[in-house]
Image (cartoon, helix red, strand yellow):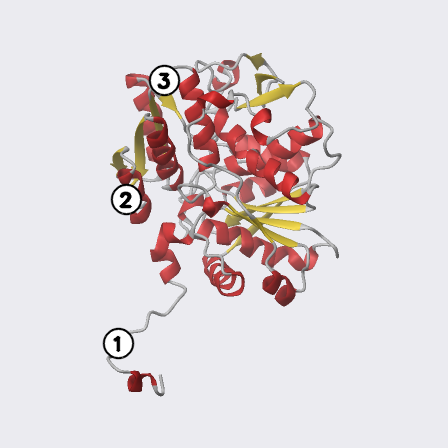
Amino acid sequence: MDFSYVCSECGQRFPIDPKFMVCPQCAMAQVLDQPLRGVLEVELAGNVAADWNVASLLPVERQFFPTIPVGNTPLWAPQRLRHELGFPGLYIKDDGLNPTCSLKDRASFLVSAFAAKFGIGEIVLASTGNAGSSMAGVGAAAGQKVTLFLPKAAPKAKLIQALQYGARVFRVDGSYDAAYDLSLAYTTRFGGLSRNTAYNPMTIEGKKTVSLEVFRQLGQAPDAVFVSAGDGCILAGVYKGFRDLRRLRLLDRLPVVYAVQAEGSAALARAFESGGFLREPASTVADSICVDVPRNGFHALRQLKEHGGQVVRVSDEQILAAQARLSRTAGLFTEPAGAAAFAGFLDARSRLPEGTVAVVLATGNGLKDTAAAGRGVVIPEKVITRLDDVNGA
């Protein structure tokens, strides 16, 4: 299998090399407070072996990957939830069971291998929390230095997780977008490999593995996939995986991908309706998808438009209710961003054709943000010392 970079806007091709992050030509059109221009994708060419596996469709050789078990997460068939909803084709892809408890490990895993292949010892990024703790954990397994810019509002659990892994963390007095800009300025001045979402082509490429796994687990492509969307990088990765499978003639159609956004962070949804991106301050209980300007906005929007995707908006109340319902009916505790995808499914399910096979991506473990989950439960105030105190409780 042969691999190269291709610009998602102008189509120009480049060798896979650390000096290429975005297309040099298209990046000249970059405008402040707008998504990235010239996002690069990995293009594969050649014939796939009959006994192909996920690793064989990635552009970095296996020997460069750290020995940490990323991927191969379970695809749940939640029987009780299926029965309650009257939807027998529902599946949940539980990426909270990755080593650092989020889907972001898929991107970090490939970025780490890429850095190792090219002899780069420091990886730099901004994150709302999951990508940072993910890169810190994977980097620890690889012996790589990780420098993280984290907005001060990031959940404490994610901050502690990154520090526990040994990352150097700078807390930013501002939003994720401010942290993103600072991290790019850091690599310009001090060097290192940027792992920033969409800016590094390996982030989208790594995330495509979730689609490859779903295809292998189901033995086919699902009819619909529900994925929470902030920057639009996971969304693009989901599309990339299914597009690669179609390119290799392993499937003949793409699923309908539903990008689910929180109402308080809905830049992609607004652009889907209007065609343009306007910066508006974002605020949502789902911190993982809370962004003012989606860095992969243009590319993600193009994927949705070209492949018949849909966008669903859900409120914070719907997200918390979906989180509780998923926990209490399926036994799966996912963080608010993962619950947002399920909330989107609940919103759209009555419009799905009968017999639809739908996959909901649960992108992170609920223990990542217990403060948010705490808003959906009532913690008992009464404490007891004897069994008789239970009576009437």
Please report whichever mark, 1 or 3, sits nearer to the chain's N-terminal start: 3
Of 193 and 270, the residue lying toward us = 193
Of 111 and 39, the residue lying toward us = 111
Query: Would residue 275 be seen by someone viewing this image from the given angle?
Result: no
Of 40 and 329, the residue lying toward us = 329
Query: CA–CA distance between discs 1 and 3?
Result: 54 Å
Q: Amino acid at mark 2?
A: Ile
Q: Which quadrant of the figure contains the N terminus? A: top right
Please report whichever mark, 1 or 2, sits nearer to the chain's N-terminal start: 2
Q: Which residue is mark 2?
A: 160
Query: CA–CA distance between discs 2 and 3?
Result: 25 Å
Name the outermost residue toward the left.
Answer: 385
Q: Which residue is mark 1?
A: 383
On screen, 364 above or below 253?
Answer: below
On screen, 4 above or below 387?
Answer: above
Q: Which residue is mark 3?
A: 120
